[in-house]
């Protein structure tokens, strides 16, 4: 490689145990399912109130692992032939984040009481591929009034990532008296059944499935929630991937010295999502919703902002 380029490669691995997750601490007692089902806290000696239902509590029942390959190429600020002074960092990460619950602020934050590791899969925040480029270019303008042509710089930031994992739940309601498909009374944790091959579509193009027409990311007919297979449906947790995201931000800056080197005035024009591309965000994952399988929101369109900095 050229002398002024630095290549770095690294493997990053972590393992975490006994992380916090929500758990129903009042499931149905399996011994009572053949007759009149009872939740275990309602059977405690001395308990005169038998009406307790789903009781969530934080428990240290989650485990997680992360394995990633990280590669970067860095060029420090230095002259580039025909271009002038430039610098950049190009980075790529290939990684896999696995857990059985992804934290109480994430979508899948609850684990079953009797089978806390049954939902072990890609984490809600797993990003398999991440690419990023950032840099700067001091424009080599030399002709004309110095205060007008000197001090111009460009700053691009280009990013790409694959989509976040998605689960398709059965959209069942937890009942105080109905054990549900798992027999534990945690019906809200049950996923739909996977009944066909998963097909992905370009969400920029409209698709039609029965009476539903819209910007579909995946085929909704691949899932059925009418009668989920015990204990938690056949559609695994986080088996889908949401929309990928590609973005470019751009800044143009002009630095002008005032009173010699003591004061520097910098004007900046910044554009976020400079090409104003639609970057899809959320996807409907409720089989009972009219937007199931469709993209339902997007990230911000192009935003322009201007600033004036005085440095001294």
Image (spheres, grey):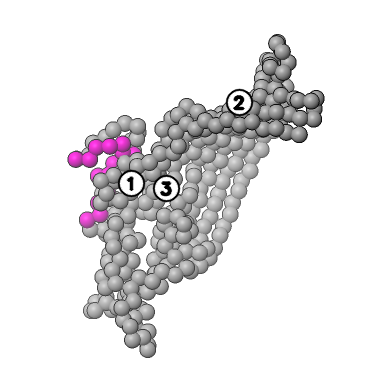
- Image-quadrant location for residue 88: top right
Q: Position of residue 111 (x, y in %)?
A: 41, 64
Task: Give left or right: position of 268 versus 180.
Answer: right
Task: Give left or right: position of 63 versus 231.
Answer: right
Q: Is residue 124 magenta?
A: no
Q: Earlier in the sequence, mark 1 or mark 3?
A: 3
- The residue beneath circle 1 is 284
Near-viewer residue (234 or 108)? 108
Q: Residue at x 53, y 41 (%)?
A: 94
Q: Is residue 87 visible?
A: no
Q: Position of residue 249 (x, y in %)?
A: 54, 31
Q: Is residue 309 visible?
A: yes
Neighbours of disc 2 within 10 Å: few (<14), some (14-19), many (20+): some
Q: Earlier in the sequence, mark 2 or mark 1?
A: 2
Neighbours of disc 3 within 10 Å: few (<14), some (14-19), many (20+): many
Q: Residue furthest bottom?
A: 46
Q: Residue at x 35, y 61 (%)?
A: 189
Q: Residue at x 33, y 86 (%)?
A: 48
Image quadrant containing the C terminus: top right
- The residue beneath circle 3 is 165
Q: Position of residue 83 (x, y in %)?
A: 67, 18
Q: Residue at x 50, y 64 (%)?
A: 20
The disc label shown at residue 252, or none: 2
Task: From this view, report whether residue 83 is shown above or below residue 213.
Answer: above
* Magenta stretch in the rendered image: 210-226
Q: Position of residue 85 (x, y in %)?
A: 70, 23
Could you tell me if the residues under marks 2 and 3 are in contact, i.e. CB atoms within 8 Å? no
Tell me the CA gap for discs 2 and 1: 38 Å
Q: Earlier in the sequence, mark 2 or mark 3?
A: 3
């Amino acid at each position: 490689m050229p002398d002024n380029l630095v290549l770095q490669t690294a493997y990053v691995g972590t393992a975490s145990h006994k992380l916090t997750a929500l758990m129903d601490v009042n499931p149905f007692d399996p011994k009572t399912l053949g007759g009149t089902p009872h939740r275990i806290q309602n059977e405690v000696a001395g308990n005169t109130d038998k009406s307790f239902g789903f009781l969530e509590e934080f428990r240290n029942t989650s485990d997680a692992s992360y394995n990633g390959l990280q590669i970067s190429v860095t060029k420090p600020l230095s002259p580039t032939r025909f271009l002038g002074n430039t610098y950049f960092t190009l980075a790529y990460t290939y990684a896999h984040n696995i857990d059985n619950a992804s934290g109480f602020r994430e979508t899948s934050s609850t684990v079953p009481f009797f089978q806390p590791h049954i939902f072990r899969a890609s984490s809600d925040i797993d990003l398999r591929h991440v690419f990023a480029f950032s840099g700067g270019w001091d424009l080599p303008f030399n002709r004309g009034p110095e205060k007008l042509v000197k001090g111009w710089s460009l700053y691009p930031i280009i990013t790409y990532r694959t989509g976040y994992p998605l689960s398709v739940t059965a959209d069942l309601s937890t009942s105080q008296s109905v054990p549900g498909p798992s027999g534990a009374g945690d019906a809200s944790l049950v996923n739909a059944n996977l009944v066909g091959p998963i097909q992905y579509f370009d969400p920029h193009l409209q698709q039609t499935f029965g009476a539903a027409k819209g910007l579909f990311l995946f085929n909704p007919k691949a899932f059925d929630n009418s009668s989920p297979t015990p204990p938690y449906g056949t559609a695994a947790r986080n088996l889908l991937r949401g929309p990928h995201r590609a973005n470019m931000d751009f800044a143009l800056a002009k630095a002008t010295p005032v009173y010699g080197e003591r004061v520097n005035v910098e004007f900046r024009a910044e554009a976020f999502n400079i090409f104003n591309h639609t970057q899809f965000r959320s996807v409907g994952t409720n089989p009972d919703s009219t937007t199931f399988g469709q993209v339902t929101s997007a990230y911000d369109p192009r935003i322009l902002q201007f600033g004036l900095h005085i440095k001294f």
